[in-house]
Amino acid sequence: MTNVERQTDGGGPNIIDTMARFLLRQLKMADMDEYNRVTLSDYLGLMYEDPKLKDVVYTRMNQLLFAENHGRKIPLYTDADLTMAQHA
């Protein structure tokens, strides 16, 4: 099983968000390059095998739906990400 909480490469939250947006039909496979399509397909397959990953993705989907229905915006990047990008 994949331990989503222990990922330290920074890719964890991004793939979770991408998977949630794809499942909500906010993103299309046709708009992605080949590498991202393959990666997303692999993670979607893994999601159905790993209940923890599935729970994390569904939680993110619920957050996105709640924000959409209540007019709140969820920031795409954290303050730390923005600060790091400004100094790069």
Image: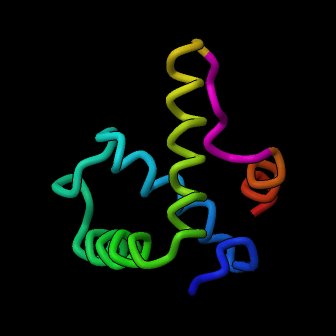
Q: Is residue 8 above or below residue 56?
A: below
Q: Position of residue 7 (x, y in %)?
A: 70, 78
Q: Nearer the viewer, residue 33 or 6?
A: 6
Residue 10, placed above or below residue 81: below
Q: Position of residue 35 (x, y in %)?
A: 30, 77
Q: Which residues are magenta?
A: 72-78
Q: Horizontal and vertical percent for residue 39?
A: 36, 76
Q: Which residue is found at the position 75% from the left and 47% from the top?
A: 78
Reply yes or no: does residue 75 show up in magenta.
yes
Question: In the picture shown, does residue 65 fall above or below 79?
Answer: above
Question: From the viewer's perspective, is 54 left or right of 9?
Answer: left
Among all residues in the image, which is located at the extreme left?
Answer: 30
Residue 38 forms part of the magenta stretch: no
The quarter of the picture where the N terminus appears is bottom right
Q: Quadrant of the C terminus?
A: bottom right
Residue closest to the far bottom: 1
- Quarter holding residue 13: bottom right
- Residue 17: % across, % down: 52, 52
* Main SS of residues in magenta: loop
- Residue at image point 60% right, 69% down: 52
On the picture, is 12 further left or further right than 37? Answer: right
